[in-house]
Amino acid sequence: MQIARTLLDKVVEHAVRDAPNECCGVVLGRDDSATTVRELENLAASPFRFDIDGRKLLPLVFADDDESEQLLAIYHSHTRSDPYPSQTDVNFAAGWPGVEWLIVGVSRNAGTDSRSYLIDGGVIKDVELEIT
C-alpha cells in the first residue's frame, strides 16, 4: 500500500493519543494508494485489544460506486508489544480477506513503529508500506 507521510502521521497521532488503550480505524483509497484515514472508536477501550462497530465498517467494504474509495487497510495500535499481529488479530482478520492490517507499535521508550501485513488463512505476510 502507498500512503502519504501526512496520512500515516494521522494514524500514528491517533495511536499516541489513545495510548495506553489501543486505537483503531481504517485506511481508504483507490488502486492500492491511500487517500483517506478514518478514526474509529475502540469499543473495547482496552490496552490489549480493539473492537470495531461493524455498522461503521461494512458500508466501506460494500461501496458499489467505481468512484468510491475502497477499504485498503484496518489499522490499530499495539501499546504493549511490537507491531506484529497477535493471535487475536489473526482471528479477527479471518473475516476480512484481502484487507491489509496496519499496526502501529507505541512504546514510551522506543517511540513508534508502523508495519503492514496481509493475513490469510492464519498466515501472516509482511507487506511493504510505501510512504510517499
Image: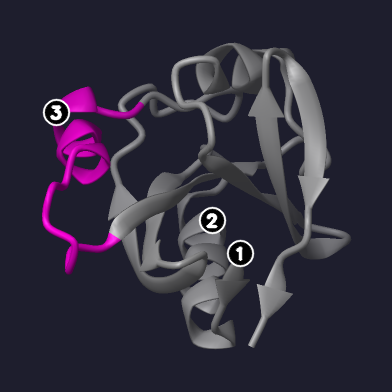
Disc 3 residue crowd, few under 14, some 14–19, many 20+, Cα 10 Å: few
51, above or below 76, in the image: above
- Residue where numbered disc 1 is placed: 1
Q: Are marks 3 and 2 in contact (CB under 8 Å)?
A: no
Highlighted range, magenta: 52-69
Name the residue nearer the viewer: 72 or 10: 72
| Callout 1: SS | loop
Q: Residue at x 55, y 48 (%)?
A: 19
Residue at label 2? 15
> Hey, what amino acid is under mark 2?
Ala
Query: What x and y, as percent, mark residue 40?
Result: 29, 46
Q: Which residue is mark 3?
A: 55
* Left or right position of 57 against 12: left
Label 1: few (<14), some or many (≥20) within 10 Å?
A: some
Q: Comparing marks 3 and 2, which lies closer to the viewer?
A: 3
What amino acid is at disc 3? Answer: Arg
Mark 3 vs mark 1: in front: 1
> In the structure shown, which secondary structural element does the residue marked by tag 2 occupy?
helix
Is residue 110 shown left or right of residue 41? right
Please report the residue visible at 68 percent of the width from the left and 80 percent of the height from the top.
Answer: 131
* Residue 56 coordinates in the image, percent (x, y): 17, 37
Q: Amino acid at mark 1?
A: Met
Q: Quadrant of the C terminus?
A: bottom right
The quadrant in which residue 119 appears is top right
Where does residue 52 sit, x and y in percent of width and height? 32, 29
- Left or right of 102 in this view: 129: right
Q: Are marks 3 and 1 in contact (CB under 8 Å)?
A: no
Query: Would you place residue 110 above or below residue 119 in this image?
Result: below
